[in-house]
Image (cartoon, grey):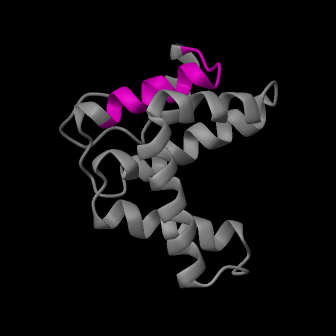
Amino acid sequence: MVADEGGADEELALRGVVRALSADALDEREILELLGRFKDNLERWGRQARLEVLSSRFGLDRVAAESAFTLSATLLVADHLVSEREKKTLVELAEALGISKSRAIQLSEGLLRTPNSERV
């Protein structure tokens, strides 16, 4: 995903999502600062620790967890290229959020396919 090896399209999509979710309360500078802090935390603490934080924040809120997973899958395909590392990160995210493999497939159905490819 963006933190793994995301391209410009993924980053642009993420900035758009943050802007929309904040109802335009954050300007571009603030969004870039926020994303910089996310990246710094990822580098400082590692992917597993960040996944554990997400898991603890969503707790038993299945709707929020599934929404976060679906949003992540959507951002993942923004550049139309899905690497093996990105696939692995998405699987790890689903596990951290307590989403079963079958439910993760349902949530990402159609997102992770291209006309000539198999489901991710």
> Is residue 11 part of the magenta span, yes or no?
no
Task: Please state the horizontal and vertical placement of residue 67, each as a whole percent of the image.
Answer: 66, 42
Question: Would you say 39 lies left or right of 65 here?
Answer: left
Q: Is residue 93 magenta?
A: yes
The residue lying toward the viewer, choosing from 37 and 79, is 37
Q: Residue at x 48, y 64 (%)?
A: 36
- When asked about the image quadrant of residue 117, the answer is top left
The secondary structure that most of the magenta stretch takes on is: helix
Quarter in which the C terminus is drawn: top left
Residue 71 position in % (x across, y down): 56, 48
Q: Quadrant of residue 51?
A: top right
Please indicate whether residue 16 sits to the left or right of residue 84 in the image: right
- Magenta stretch, residue numbers: 86-100
- Disc tally is 0
Q: Which residue: 56% across, 41% down?
A: 70
Q: Position of residue 53 (x, y in %)?
A: 65, 34
Residue 56: x and y in percent read 73, 29
**Relative to 78, residue 102 above or below:** above
Specify the farthest residue to the left.
Answer: 116
Query: In terms of depth relative to the viewer, which is nearer, 36 or 114?
Result: 36
Q: Residue at x 59, y 23 (%)?
A: 96
Q: Can residue 73 be seen?
A: no
Which residue is the extreme one toward the front? 44
Q: Nearer the viewer, residue 18 or 73?
A: 18
Furthest toward the right, the residue is 60
Q: Is residue 37 above or below residue 56?
A: below
User: Is residue 44 something one can see in this rendering?
Assistant: yes
Q: Is residue 67 above or below residue 29?
A: above
Residue 65 as seen in the image, left or right of residue 34: right
> In percent of the image, x 65 and y 35: which residue is there?
54
